[in-house]
Image: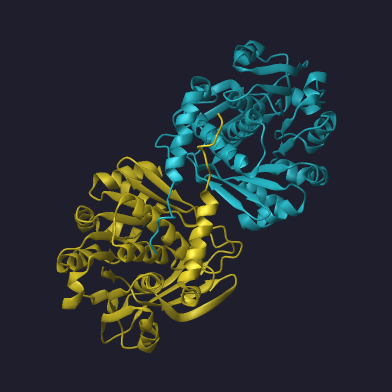
Chain colours: A yellow, B cyan
Amino acid sequence: MSLLVVGSIALDSIFTPFGETADALGGSAVYFSVAGSLLHPVQVVGVVGSDYPRAELERLAPRGIDWSGVEQAAGESFRWKGKYSYDLQSRETLETRLGVFADFQPKLPEAFRQAEFLFLGNIDPELQLDVLSQVHRPKLVVCDTMNYWIGSKKAPLLDLLSRVDLLMVNDSEARELSGDWNIHRAGRWILAHGPSRVVIKQGEHGALLIEATRTFYVPAFPLETVFDPTGAGDAFAGGFMAYLARTGSITEDNIRRAMVYGAAMGSYAVEQFGIRRLEGITLADVETRVRAFQDLTQVSLAQAPV
Amino acid sequence: MSLLVVGSIALDSIFTPFGETADALGGSAVYFSVAGSLLHPVQVVGVVGSDYPRAELERLAPRGIDWSGVEQAAGESFRWKGKYSYDLQSRETLETRLGVFADFQPKLPEAFRQAEFLFLGNIDPELQLDVLSQVHRPKLVVCDTMNYWIGSKKAPLLDLLSRVDLLMVNDSEARELSGDWNIHRAGRWILAHGPSRVVIKQGEHGALLIEATRTFYVPAFPLETVFDPTGAGDAFAGGFMAYLARTGSITEDNIRRAMVYGAAMGSYAVEQFGIRRLEGITLADVETRVRAFQDLTQVSLAQAPV
């Protein structure tokens, strides 16, 4: 089943304690599709400026990424510059230049409007609503957002929430959106505003899937070497959505499995700068890590003799 | 099999956003034994001052807590006063008065020296070593420690580490002890210094069991109402050790199950002030929460059609 993502396509300059990159391929749609394409073809809608190294994107096309929905506009590409703390636990945004992203008006190619799995990456909620209106009959709509939109575009964001199946956000975003510091109450608040499910990403502490009556938890994979946390959440989303599109099922059990595939992708994403690690792995690597997640959480309580 | 704990028996004064208590029963040995006794009898070694409400301890004896190893010394009992932040994520120690604890010299009753499961709660590592030397042939020795001892008694602490089977600490303690901010590398460092296993408690983010070749993760139970985090780690330890003593097995599988029982006890501990919630629950309640933990992490990957 077809999988469509709309999101940012950026040039990232990242400083970590272990090194730095300048103008490297980044942005939510890029991380999402590089991870997701390990499992299922991905269609991308976005915009780049006239300075974007489009050949770099095309180099990734054979993985199964359809960039035909990426518009090239006159002007500068979206750029983000950030610096991580010594322990990678926090980061500072040094510079954000929206460039052509400021005037982006997504227009979906006709073929993309049939998408069954739609991921609305972190962009202006009005644009997310616009994209949603262009897709005919999606089977599952998932959206992301960020603190900036929660503060500046709350009304369209709430409108969007009432129209999506699942919101996927960081814990700090869930707290800010709901006004509640308790992450489980924050999840309830979100469910009360539309989505039947919410995924709350907690970085090195894993991710929660909160539904009306059940909660599922997937830990972060134990990594002794984390290199660059950028894009881990978008890689998680890519693995999650692509697993669902590949299997074509959105049962509760399958969504739990998708959480593990998402966590596996997120864990690979952070092992090298930018998209490098995700580019270098195979489906077999993903399966190996998924099995490692199983071992990490497996406990047989049926045999407990209490 | 017999279970022995040595640790503090305190009078706690706690301020949370939801209320306060003064001179309430607390201390690591108290939380440990109130939780653990839901599963297995607990023998306690410790000291209280002449002002301690000993009748309050005796009231708990019918649960299966043997206080006969608790010495009553002339002087003031150990007191701790602390205040939690609005979101319970951090706390400030307002006052610590060691009282009779300052001159404590543990002397184990003869019957206690046969203990098969020994938990060395967070006290001076020299005292922990002393207690360990008095126990004849323990099957499993687990110890806790804290930043204070890591800073002031590193040498005896390292000596102790080389003599125990498992170290159980908070993430901040694991980081301080190893000098490594990465929790998994910190775990490796600890394993290299003696214990064959380390449990790293991460508060609202659950707990890790790190062994030579495997890692197990148990999340914290999703709680929409947390009232008082005091004692959660000691309740975890009590559930963990009492489950092992009850079942008499220290296989890898059984230790994973013990982690879930520990997490269940920790999750109950925080639902009311002090030991109140732990006092009010039954073994059936514990079993119910253990099953809820299973549901929280259960995912069938065998059926994944990738």
Question: Looking at the image, is B73 positioned above or below residue A141?
Answer: above
Q: Is B264 on the left or on the right of A141, as rendered?
A: right
Q: Can residue B158 be seen in this view?
A: yes
Residue A241 position by quadrant? bottom left
Nearer-the-camera pick, A84 or A257:
A257
Measuring 81% from the left and 30% from the top, which residue is drawn there? B131
Question: Looking at the image, is B272 positioned above or below residue A37?
Answer: above
Measuring 22% from the left and 49% from the top, which residue is drawn there? A194
Nearer-the-camera pick, B170 or B244:
B244
Q: Is residue A181 visible?
A: no
Measuring 77% from the left and 51% from the top, which residue is drawn there? B193
Nearer-the-camera pick, B291 or A182:
B291
Which image quarter is the C terminus of chain A in? top right
Residue A51 locus on image (x, y percent)? 35, 88
Marks counted in the figure total 0
Measuring 26% from the left and 87% from the top, which residue is drawn there? A74
Question: Looking at the image, is B244 positioned above or below residue A246?
Answer: above
Residue A17 locus on image (x, y percent)? 59, 70
Residue B44 locus on image (x, y percent)? 71, 23
Residue B31 position by quadrant? top right
Residue A197 locus on image (x, y percent)? 30, 50
Which image quarter is the N terminus of chain A in? bottom left
